[in-house]
Amino acid sequence: MEQECPYCKSKRVIKNGTTRHGKQNHKCKNCHRQFVSNPQNQPIPEATKQTNHMERFNCTLRQRVARLVRKTLSFSKKLDNHIAMIWLFVHHYNTLIQSKILIIPS
């Protein structure tokens, strides 16, 4: 089976070892880029790359809930207490965000 470079569409492709998962790695002789035929991990389309809201929330959660950061102070011995405190924070945070959205005129 003859490989084609997905970048420059050249047929001048050679085998270039394997990936850490055991798949055949190829290298284009024209553009010198490496690629794997039939990759499992496809790149995320630009239209769906909206992870910044979730990343910001995770950062806020880590910064404001000491139970997620520290292992000695504010440590919950029971998982139920830990979950309850995170739930309270999320509920309080969402309430504040909603109230700020309603107060600020556009």
Image (cartoon, helix red, strand yellow):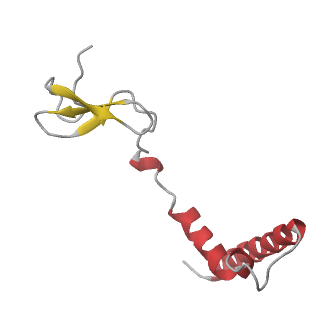
Quadrant position of residue 21? top left
- Circle count: 0
**Residue in view at x 39 percent, y 30 percent:** 23
* Quadrant (top left/top right/bottom left/bottom right) for the N terminus: top left
Q: Position of residue 99 (x, y in %)?
A: 71, 79
Q: Position of residue 103 (x, y in %)?
A: 66, 82
Is 48 situated left or right of 26 in this image?
right
Is 80 situated left or right of 94 in this image?
right
> Is 19 or 101 nearer to us in this picture?
19
| Vertical side of 53 occupied by 36: above or below | above
Is 38 situated left or right of 76 in this image?
left
| Vertical side of 56 occupied by 104: above or below | below
Is 105 situated left or right of 97 in this image?
left
Quadrant position of residue 31? top left
* Quadrant (top left/top right/bottom left/bottom right) for the C terminus: bottom right
**Residue at the farthest left position:** 30
Quadrant position of residue 8? top left
**Residue at the farthest top position:** 1
Q: Position of residue 52 (x, y in %)?
A: 50, 63
**Residue in view at x 70 percent, y 80 percent:** 70
